[in-house]
Image (cartoon, rainbow, N blue to C red):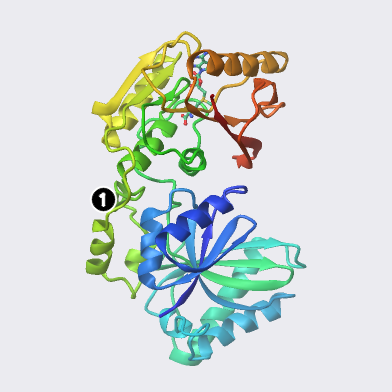
Amino acid sequence: MTLQLIATCGLGLEELVARELTDLGVAEIQTQRGAVTFRGSWQDCWRANWRLRTANRVLVELGQWPGEDGDALAAGARALIGKRQLYGRSGPDVGALLSPDRTFSIRATTSASRIRDLRWAALKVKDGLVDGQRDRYRRRSSIDRDRPDLPLRVRLHRDRATLTLDTSGEPLDRRGYRVITSQAPMREQLAAACVLAADWNGSGPVVDPMCGSGTLLAEAAMVAVGRAPGTLRANAPFGWAFERFPSFDSDAFARIREESIPAPGPDVELYGIDRSPQAIGASRANLARAGFKDRATLTTGDAFEFIPPAGPGLFLVNPAYGERLAEEPLQWKRLGDLLKRHYTGWRAVVLAGGDTLGKPIGLKPTRRIPVKNGPLEARILIFDMY
Ligand SMILES: C[S@@+](CC[C@H](N)C(=O)[O-])C[C@H]1O[C@@H](n2cnc3c(N)ncnc32)[C@H](O)[C@@H]1O
């Protein structure tokens, strides 16, 4: 069976997700705003959930139809169940998948559409789907908002509805290693994006001199040793939604989990510094949970006083820039000076936000990727410190 799949992601991460998907060998990869579409089998879908470091979720497309008003939305959903045919060239039989024996839930999003009320949009699609089930089976599914068998999503864009099945369930940033968070932690996908954007060859130590809860160090270590981001999640109580689908084959998924992943830095060493002892405590707990305790040297101290280990290696930082606005340019300049003084030959990645987006650093980045850090504008800046 060939599925039309969608990996959703934060704005700005589309190219990195597409590159990860290319490495997974899937077909017809196309980037959109905040998503990358591709074609593949259920196995490709499970592998994407297991391996993608920079995506939020993996969805399977189940149908598209015009949804300019409530009646059209419901009628399209009803027809989808009644059709008794595959969706797409050789896709899933949506009516069989949505059997009345399975519970489902629906979440809606809308953009540039006449219908703006999300709950109403979800309700109309639900009405259509259960009417379609009654037509075909004389019975309907129960709705389960907390732990449905089938978590469905409907996206209305320009008055057109797309129904998808969320195969991830909990978003993919729930890796399972963050047991304690410090102030302003970054999302795991963004941390992984910083590492992947660096095109690091895996050699040398990794330093984060403002490490907070250790997210950048953990993501760098997982890339270096070839550890899938889903590793700890495989034993977590929430797992992935696809494990509850009728198409799931646990033996095939076990084989996917055994596949080897390139490990460019199997002996990587991690150095984390933070001026907050609580942050160092969080990093210690999280890196231990991630299985990197023996590789990590974590110290309470000032980023600007820290003398790095012999390099070159990878420098990663998501700084706290200027508690007072007026201080921001000076803080960035200090960071630029630090890189020039102590990190010659290193590759440096700075997740820069704030008012100036890191411009006062005073170094020319080799690469600059506009991203969102939560709701805030940010830039991933890559520097080669010659
Ligand atoms: C935005 S947070 C980093 C979050 C981290 N990337 C994470 O995912 O948890 C910035 C961190 O920099 C630390 N910090 C700020 N100024 C510092 C300095 N001069 N030296 C060391 N740490 C500093 C703060 O204590 C804070 O933990």
Crowd tier of the residue under label 1, counting other residues whose Cα lies within 10 Å: few below 14, some 14–19, many 20 or above: few
Quadrant of the image containing the N terminus: bottom left
Residue 128: quadrant of the picture: bottom right
Q: Residue 328 appears at what percent x and percent y? A: 68, 18
What residue is shown with label 1? 235
Q: Residue at x 25, y 67 (%)?
A: 250
| Label 1 residue SS | helix
Q: Residue 176 appears at what percent x and percent y? A: 34, 43
For the question of whether residue 280 can be seen, the reply is yes
Q: Residue at x 35, y 21 (%)?
A: 281
Q: Nearer the viewer, residue 226 or 240?
A: 226
Q: Nearer the viewer, residue 322 or 119?
A: 322
Quadrant of the image containing the C terminus: top right
Is 282 situated above or below 1?
Answer: above
Residue 274: quadrant of the picture: top left
| Left/right of residue 334 with respect to residue 176 in the rendered view | right
Q: Residue 114 appears at what percent x and percent y? A: 77, 67
Is 247 situated above or below 23?
Answer: below
Residue 312: quadrant of the picture: top left
